[in-house]
Amino acid sequence: MSTPDSTSFLTMLPTFTSSTPEVPAVEANATSCQHWEQVHHTLFHLGNLSLLLGLLIPTTLGLHMILLRLFLMTGCSLFIAWATFYRCNLDVMVWNVVFLVVNFMHLFFLLYKRRPIKIDRELRTVYKQMFEPVHVQEALFQRLTGQFCTIQTLKKGQAYAAEDKTSVDERLSILLKGKMKVSYRGHFLHNIYTNSFIDSPEFRSTEMHRGEKFQVTIVAEENCKFLCWSRERLTYFLESDTFLNEVFKYLIGKDITNKLYTLNDPTLSDKAVKKMDRQPSLCSQLSMMQMRNSMASTSDTDDVLNQILRGGSAGSSLQKSPETKSSTKMRPIEEGMEDDVFEESVSSLQQHTASTKEV
């Protein structure tokens, strides 16, 4: 039983309405979107079309990434215009501005990578004839020639290397201009022409054996200019780039093949040697240094040179001793010796006739 005081207190409290909205009853087979909004502006559809075109670009196309970034930037710009002028939606505009900035940075980086590389005029011919056919990009060639690499000159008559004096561990060079002559103890071996390595046989032969000296003399027959790498730094750089390392192996092997070919066929003219472009074969694995060392280790240089020029084997000549070689040489017949021979033959004939008469 309530008291009068409690009854009056309850009547004084305000009545609170329920804050939970009433959920309209939904039929079992009805969809939640009964009333679709009006179609968006044309800018909205053009922005989506730009995104679609960017995603449909085939990856086999050379400018695939650049075109993709351009279409993404176009779509973002159209979305920004649509959200700003027709929807007045700040969050949509801000997000598309962020996307636009990111795509612009990517596009700038891609265009920077495809910028034209300016190769020095003196190195342009070397790149076109030696490195471009093996698919070395201009940017990689610029890295190769821009570091630890110098262009040096030699006047006519100056020596690039002297036999038994110059170390082979210092450098590797490509002749850019002029002509050089390779000789051993005054005997001509072959010439070195432009766009070819100067000391490729020594570079290949002494990769595992350091501290050796040149076995030949290389002298400039004309005013020469050559590209010179520090051998130690070049070797370190090639070890960090597998593709460029294989390219150098190919080019050096090809150069050694050409030198061996000209050494075995000295009748080739200068024009024929310059135009010669032989593919590397098994000969590229041979070392011209072995041929030069065999010539240096024998006393009879003329025989070895003649044997090399005739296509013979220098190794077989090493097995023969100098005494055997000197004994097999034909000595010239002197006039006095001819008279003695004839006098001895006449006297023997007279003795023979006298004996027959006595009989």
Image (tube, helix red, strand yellow):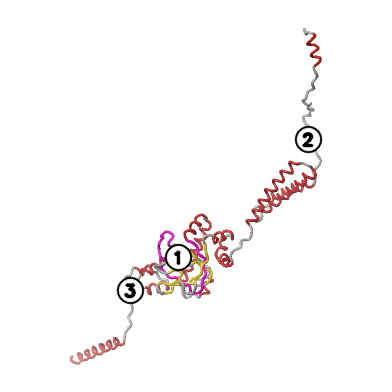
Picture coordinates of residue 345, whole percent (x, y): 26, 88
Q: Is residue 110 magenta?
A: no
Eye-nearest disc, 3 or 1:
1
- Which residue is disc 1 drawn over? 201
Mark 3 or mark 1, earlier in chain: 1
- Which residue is disc 3 drawn over? 325
Picture coordinates of residue 48, whole percent (x, y): 74, 47
Mark 1 and mark 2 residues within 8 Å of each other at the beta carbon: no
Check disc 1 and give the amino acid type: Pro
Within-10-Å neighbours for mark 2: few <14, some 14–19, many 20+:
few
Report the Cα–Cα distance between label 3 and label 2: 108 Å
Mark 3 and mark 2 residues within 8 Å of each other at the beta carbon: no
* Residue 264 visible in image: no
In the structure shown, which secondary structural element does the residue marked by tag 2 occupy? loop
Q: Which of the numbered marks, if any, corresponds to residue 238?
A: none
Q: Name the residue at the bottom extreme.
A: 357
Q: Is residue 32 above or below residue 306?
A: above
Mark 3 or mark 2, earlier in chain: 2
In the structure shown, which secondary structural element does the residue marked by tag 1 occupy? helix
Quadrant where the N terminus lies? top right
Report the front residue among 230 and 135.
Answer: 230
Picture coordinates of residue 293, whole percent (x, y): 39, 67
The residues colored magenta run: 205-230
Mark 1 or mark 2, earlier in chain: 2
Q: Is residue 22 above or below residue 53?
A: above
Check disc 2 and give the amino acid type: Cys
- Which residue is disc 2 drawn over? 33
Picture coordinates of residue 70, whole percent (x, y): 70, 52
In the structure shown, which secondary structural element does the residue marked by tag 3 occupy? helix
Q: What is the quadrant of residue 327 in the picture?
A: bottom left
Q: Residue at x 80, y 22 (%)?
A: 17
